[in-house]
Amino acid sequence: MVLPPPASTRLLTIVAQVDHGKTTLADSLVESNGIISERLAGSIRYLDSLEEEQKRGITMRCSAIGLRHRYCANPKADAQNVVVHLIDSPGHVDFSAEVTTSLLACDGALLVVDAVEGMCARTHNILREAYAAQLVPVLLINKVDRLCTDLGFGCNEAYMRLRELIESVNAASAAMIRSARALGDDDDDDTQGNEIKKDKADKEEEEEGLWNFEPAKGNVVFCSALHGWGFTVPSLARSLFRSKTVPIKPPVLRQYLFDDVKYRHKDGKVIKWKREQSGADEENMIMFSEFGLRPLWDAYEGVSTAVACVDVASGRDAKIKADTPGMDTLLAAMQIGSTASAVANNGSDDLHCNPQTVEEMQRIIRRTGANSTEAVLRAMLRRYRPLSDAVLDAACEHCPDPSVASSSIRTRALAVDDFPSGSSGSNGSEAFVEETAPDDLHRIQEAVRRCDTSPDAPTVAHVCKFVVTDRASVTDSGLPSPQGENGKPLSMIMGLTRVLSGTLRSENVEYFCFGPKHTPGVKIAQKKLRLYLLMGSSFVKVEQIPAGHICAVYDLEDLQLKTITLCDSAHGMPIRGFHHGLKPLVKVNVEPISASDTAALEKGLVKLALADASVEVTATSKGERLLSCLGEIHLEQSIHDLETTYCGKEIKLRVSEPIVDFGECTAWFDNETSADFEQFFDDKSPPLRQITIPPYCYEEGIGHAHRGRCRALLSGRPAAISLRVVPLTSVVYKSLKAGTVVGDSEDICALGKVLQCSQVDDADGILREILASSCTLDNNGNAMIEASGIRNGTYIKTVFTENGEVYVPPSSTTDNLSTQQNGGSNNEEPTEEGVDIAVGRNVYDDLRSIIRAGGLAGDGAEVPAKGKSEESPAATIWPDEMRGSVAAGFHLAMRSGPFCEEPVRGVLVVVEGIEIATTSSPPYKGLKPVGGGIVVAALRSGIRCALLSRPARLVEGHLRLTLHSSFTGLGPLHAVLSRRRGKVLTDDMVEGTDLIRVTANLPQAESFHLAPELLKESSGNVTAPELVFSHWEVLEEDPFWIPTSLEEREDFGEILMSGDSSTGIKNNALKYIRAVRDRKGLLVDSKKIVVAAEKQRTLARKK
């Protein structure tokens, strides 16, 4: 098989919102090549080859196919053969990673939009992804027939609706481009010359032109994929001029056809159309309405009349014929503005021509077997205005061929990475490469940029994703038998590959395989490949594939890389590409029912993670195998594939309930933001309830924590770190990250007052003071700072002792009560042989008094540089041995909180003071180690205890929900969302319909099994919701609150049992904490607790 050069090739992908008609459109394009019959097109869903896809009626995996098309760029020139590689991508948000793959592999995007539903949330996301991938779009407005059949619009009303839809798409594109440039997607260097700036401005203008949809340009197709018709304004203009319906040359006529003008037949002039002009719609018709829509409207009306006449006729076997009343209206309409390339002549084969007579129409009906409304409409309208010709002509005209795309349009997405800086020419560098490597890499980059197909060009190909197929679908005699040992078809993993330069050859050449994170100097795997052409669900073996084409490659499975760049040179680098940016929303634990299938499951999980880029597989230390997917449908499909395909045999799996990720946080005390710093420091309020109940009271060091403060003792007591934990809002965190005030400054001022900053009312001054306090940030909204006194030494104290231990005061009330119950003294009270209590206590009290008076500002005298001083030894030990470990302890503590071992979010840790024990005589060194893991463990324990002593809060993920509902479904929809703690954000009417587009926020923990409940409660009046991650939000419920006053007991009830840790009320936060602790095997407060093991006495919840 000889494939054409890149100039005669197009790489296209179909993208759209789910149910907007992508696969039906693909059927029409496939049928134009004779691969499927006309009768099945639109209903067979040829590219949906999976059983689950056919069952659910949605696309789940990308499918590719090669098509041939005769394209004539100039009416006076001969048509040329063009090979179109078409990829049909899913529309459901659960399979958005498949869309990202198809966008990377192709140069043009067929953006399908429903004429009734218009721009949906998913459409906006796809638009942004296509722009990020630097594709050239063509807009297909599908289901135009619904404006007539479902909504009953007149031609002028339909034109206004279509114009508004195009304007909305253009507005979204313009806003997207402006936003991307404002965020710095396009580099801007003030030092550039005027010519460079001018070239950049020209490129930006050209880019805006590519993303501006104008019917007169021909990058907008009006179509009905179900009935197989479609047209563009230029093709309609050529047809009207060719048939002498409108004697205006096509270049001029195309400018008029989609404008507010009308054609005056008596003198052949084009005049301005006025909405308020008197006269019926038939008499005051816009040109597009008259010549573009009215023939179609008449065709639908004629077939409806014919169907009505047939229904009235006696007998069920009555069929529509060409002479049935109403069909004459259809025939007359088909003579106006036909875009078919040929018309039927008497005696000719008229199957592919527009009929001119009743006899020709009857022959078409008889030979196609059209006997229903849909079949007759499709049989006639696909000949009147062929959809495949309109779509493929528009794509060939506006979408670039691979050589143009790689050289001038997709220069960023298809570029080969450079070597990392400092990686060439030096044996001492971390990533050593040969001296000739930069020249070879430059040659490779230039070949990719030009899509070079010459014999001596370096071969480069990019494997975008992997797909799984069965051996029976592969035409290759060199592979093993299609049947496995157990009689089940063998599964194969193929790589969807785009050849970027050179010629990719089968079996004869070993290619270097570069992973997405390849580092020069690392050993590169080499593989021989088998190449296949993609034909939907079939794979046909070929010997070679030139640049500019898409193929499938086999024998890369064992590399365990989700994307691979192939090159025949060892000096290559991977393709830059881009990331889809979505995170998995559903996580479950999977395990085989039969233990003998464990090895098969592990192999299957590896294959699944390889074939699906959005799947994450994690093995935990407890032996769990966690499978993370983008949504419930994605999870169900992944589990089905595991059980039937990837494991090599059919196995049964046990799947846990969905695992929800939470965060742990804290809230302000009632008087923390209102009281001054010293007043809150001296507050002697009783400890919070969680400190007094198991299992939280068992936390090590909890006796030294009070109201958000804790004194963390290092193992062996060589030092103590005094710290405080307070809430950190997202506004403050973003301001710390940006280095300037972002958003409202009220939160910053409140934090400044709590920390007793020197400038309480100046947000900028507070922010500068916090940033100067050795600020450490993580990625979960947490930060750690040091008080100013630690930097200048005021808050660093030395304890001169004989045994190297700091002073330990008596524990809190909780530990004292525990000591009394155990009948002994407090084990943490120092003995006489321990630390010098008097000296240690003086240092301890002195540090507390300084912290109480200074706060974060920490005004105090500087530490003397030389000479004996109580501060000098500790001030030296702290930065040299402890400070680095404190940062590690902070990050470790933020990984798992004390309530349910979930990550901590939105917390600020303030290191307020340091005490270090040293010898009382020179050289003033500690007798015990104070660095490394000892500091990390102590700080982690101290932060956990400080969090336990503050009001507890959970942070839960929220999802953004979008769906369409009728007026009837609004009531049940709001009821379901209310039960699940959802909040409706917008509910806007879709103009021209009775549908309402609803956007809402929903907690992730309440999002499971939402679609079945909505469909059941609304009786099908609500569409299936689409869920994507939105943000993290604090759940404002105290999980440990119980009713205490008489009014609270009347409102919420009594606790269930005296001494029990249950609240006795519906508390979502407590429910989630218990569920997470139970799943992780941690002690749960509601379980039976052994009080006296020797008596086997238990306390149980009474139900």
Image (cartoon, rainbow, N blue to C red):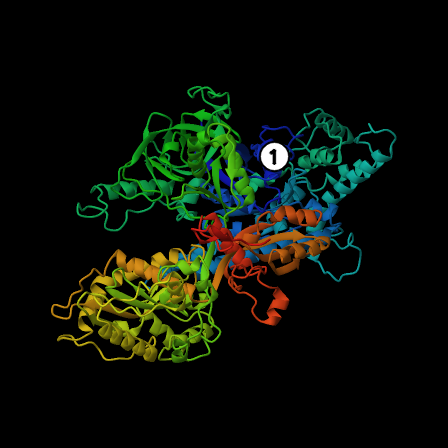
Mark 1 sits on what residue?
54
User: Image quarter for residue 320?
Assistant: top right
Q: Residue at x 39, y 48 (%)?
A: 411
Q: Is residue 328 above or below residue 150?
A: above
Residue 263 visible, this orientation: no
SS for dot 1: helix
Q: Is residue 1081 above or below residue 11?
A: below
Query: Which residue appears at 31% of the width and 40% of the height?
Result: 444
Question: What kind of residue is marked 1?
Answer: Gln
Front residue of 550 and 872: 872
Judged from this view, the residue extending furthest toward the left is 922
Decide if residue 271 is on the left or right side of residue 421: right
Horizontal placement of 929 versus 415: left or right?
left
Q: Is residue 216 above or below residue 512?
A: below
Front one among 945 and 908? 945
Residue 871 location (% of width, % of height)? 20, 73
Q: Quadrant of the N terminus?
A: top left
Q: Position of residue 24 (x, y in %)?
A: 62, 38
Point out residue 1007 in the picture as x, y percentages from the top left corner: 57, 51
